[in-house]
Amino acid sequence: MASKIPHALCPLIRKLESVTRLSDEERHAIEALPVRVRTLSARQDIAREGDLATQCCLILEGWAYRYKLLSEGRRQIFSFHIAGDIPDLQSLHIPLMDHNLGTMTQATVAFIPHESMHDLTARFPSIAAKLWRDTLIDAAIFREWLIAMGRRPAFEHLAHLFCELYLKQEAVGLAGDHRCSLPIT
């Protein structure tokens, strides 16, 4: 059952406002989105490769990651996601999942129906532009991961990863004083 939980969408508002300003009307429109909130345990899939997505997943608390399973059963992680991230936003336009999305830690997530996101972006093109910008930032981070996996020495790869994770958390108020959560092993 979907419900309107204004405070559940605060991480998304905080994330968008970390790079650009939202008007009061835009903020209220985001807060009015219908969401279904679930708390998932660590190491649980949120979406699987091959799924047909009908909703987007907003991370409210905890950590998630995007990955693919290789033929021999190992995982290749492509990105880490924190509160405010919508790691499957591309499913609005490409609904067939070509990767998996799972939780690293216990995580609280909000599922937002695609039809509601389409309606929001049609009514507020400026929000669509803000989400598009977020997707472009995600793509830039992904390109850095490709470089790191293919060409950077391990020390530089880890240094870049630590900086990325710190800056992502700092931008949304989850880190400061050069300290942040890092639940990876």
Image (spheres, grey):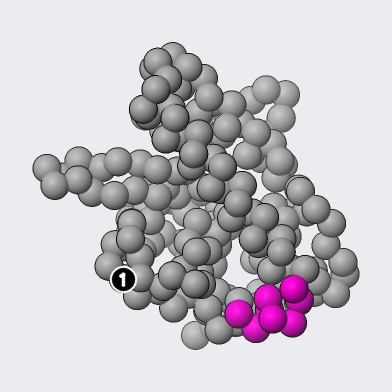
- The mark tally for this picture is 1
The x, y position of residue 114, in whole percent, is 53, 78
- At x 56%, y 42%, the residue is 140
Quarter-wise, where is residue 131 in the image? bottom right
Name which residue lies at 39% across and 22% down: 151
Name the image quarter holding the C terminus: top left
The stretch in magenta equals 118-125
- SS state under label 1: loop
The answer to whether residue 123 is magenta is yes
Evaluate whether residue 51 shows in this view.
Answer: yes
Q: Which residue is mark 1?
A: 51
- Any part of residue 31 in sight: no
Residue 110: image location, x then y, percent: 54, 67
x and y percent of residue 19 in the render?
A: 76, 48
Q: Is residue 4 above or below residue 152?
A: below
Left or right? Give the position of 109 relative to 3. left
**Residue 154 drawn at (x, y percent):** 39, 17
Front in this rendered view, residue 38 or 146: 146
Q: In the rendered view, tell whether residue 152 sits above or below residue 35.
A: above
- Residue type indicated by callout 1: Asp
- Count neighbours of disc 1 (C-alpha within 10 A) and say few if under 14, some if 14 to 19, many if 20 or more: few
Question: Which residue occupies 50% across, 56% down?
Answer: 87
